[in-house]
Image (cartoon, rainbow, N blue to C red):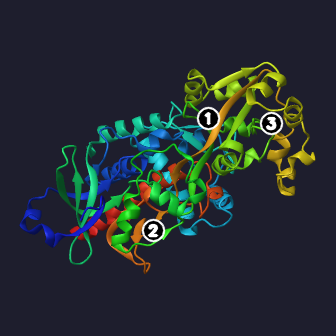
Amino acid sequence: MNKLYQVRRLQEFGNSASEWPEFPVGIIGSGACGLTAALMLQDLGVEALVLERDGVASGSTALSSGFVPAAQTVAQKRAGIQDSIEVFASDVQSKAHGTAAPHLVQAYCHAVQKAIDALELNHGIEWHVLDQFLYPGHSQYRMHAVKEKTGAGLMSALLSAAERAGVTLLNHAHAQELVLDAQDCIVGVGFRRPDQSMEYVRVQALILACNGFGANEQLVREYLPAIANAFYAGHHGNDGAAVLWSKDLDVDLKDMGAYQGHGSWAIPQGSLITWAIMMQGGVQINSEGKRFHNETLGYSEAAVEVLSQPGGQAWAVIDSELLELARGFPDFVQAEQLGAVKRCESVTELAKLIGCDHEVLAHELNWPLGDPAASFLSDAERESSAAERIFKRRLTPPFYAIHVTGALFHTQGGLNIDCECHVLNSSGQPFKNLWAAGGAARGVSGGAVWGYLSGNGLLSALAGGLIAAQSVAQHIQSQEN
């Protein structure tokens, strides 16, 4: 066989399988999901081996903003923020227009609070709640971040916690083979080393935390044609391993049309521009000098809106007040240092930069909420408090403009799982000892780009990591009794 990802039978290995080293639990992937699972298992007294394909763990987590939504956490209470898990779950489901898997919405919204608190109280990761603005779709301040306010900072904190806890993490270990016994139980994992040799370990249980399929062009074109030609801003390792294994495991796939896009990817710098500036009154202008969508609905669906404009590009326009807000985000500071932010002293200068008509742009920057120019707003959007607040705000010179396009960040569909993150086969029955979470499994964004609520990726990662760990620990203990 020459497939990159294979499912093999134990009998193929003969007596050599008896020499494989053994671990109670194997975890494929060391992003936020895999490390959370490993840390929670360590707390429960269960040893795990984490297999990481790269030389240094980073993945999608390091490329993300690092913001995790959660309600009723220690950090939220410390900040005096009143919230509830029920309201949080309602926000998740509302953003997905009621199409998110109900069992996972409830399970994840409850579990992420436990994960956030456990990581702080047991592993020293201090969380801060962002309370300057509400992200699209959230009714309360509930975005949690480490002090750096970056995904790289979150990864660093998780890796440090794993090292302190004694988690066994093996880098340069690209898992490519799952080994089943005659009863269809996972009994081993094969991983390729840098010298192209294969090594194998025995496991009693396996957690797939290897993220999604955004880097697999063939799978993206099959499942996400609307975003297939967009710039991919995710991790190269998200090549669909779990999806490809599912073909041989007879596993059902769910929500494969869901993904996180982003409508503010700076070009040519290749940097993420925080959507906070859009939620506080920034605007997006196309090459004709016109606004073209409701920026308050969310950055994920904005990717498709931007890509539908001439040249698949737009300009994010802010003023001095919003520039100061943006400079509170390290990703934006880096983009500014790379030259992404262009200062324009007047509408005339801004129009020259964009290459559009001055009068058209001047009108677009100043139309009132009821103006026919805002034809892309529905009646409900015109009447919403967000529209009232944001669309009546006037940008004042000097202006600051960033050339942007739409990008694909990560996928939100994957293996079908139950509320304990057991992988389900095509008949809806759970595999005896296989779990999936984070980007490897279906998420809570329904089946389309507009269902993605800010932070859903890391919500699935941390919540799914904790749930899978607890379920696996029960499985291991039942095997020992």
Q: Nearer the viewer, residue 476 or 332?
A: 332
Looking at the image, which residue sits at the far left? 15
Q: Which residue is mark 1?
A: 273
- Please state which of residues 107 and 306 is positioned toward the viewer in this rendering: 306
**Nearest the eye: 369 or 221:** 221
Cα separation between marks 3 and 1 = 20 Å
The quarter in which the C terminus is drawn is bottom left
Q: Residue at left 21%, top 47%?
A: 193
For this orientation, the residue located farthest to the top is 345
Q: Is 229 placed left or right of 54 in the picture?
A: right
Between the C-alphas of marks 2 and 1, the distance is: 33 Å
Q: Which mark is residue 289?
A: 3
Q: Which residue is located at x 18 percent, y 57 percent?
A: 200
Give the residue type at disc 3. Answer: Gly
Crowding near the residue tagged with mark 3, few <14, some 14–19, many ≥20 C-alpha atoms within 10 Å? many
List the single residue furthest toward the bottom.
Answer: 427
Measured along the vertical axis of the image, is residue 283 above or below residue 117? above
Q: Position of residue 157 (x, y in %)?
A: 41, 36
Occupied quadrant, residue 430: bottom left
Nearest to the observer: residue 124 or residue 378: 378
The residue carrying mark 2 is 417
User: What secondary structure is marked by label 2?
Assistant: loop
Query: Would you call the spot at circle 2 few (<14 residues within 10 Å), some (14-19), or many (20 or more)?
Result: many
Q: Earlier in the sequence, mark 3 or mark 2?
A: 3
SS of the residue at dot 3?
loop
Question: Can the viewer see residue 471 in this picture?
Answer: no
Q: Nearer the viewer, mark 3 or mark 2?
A: 3
Q: In the displayed structure, does residue 306 sit left or right of residue 268?
A: right
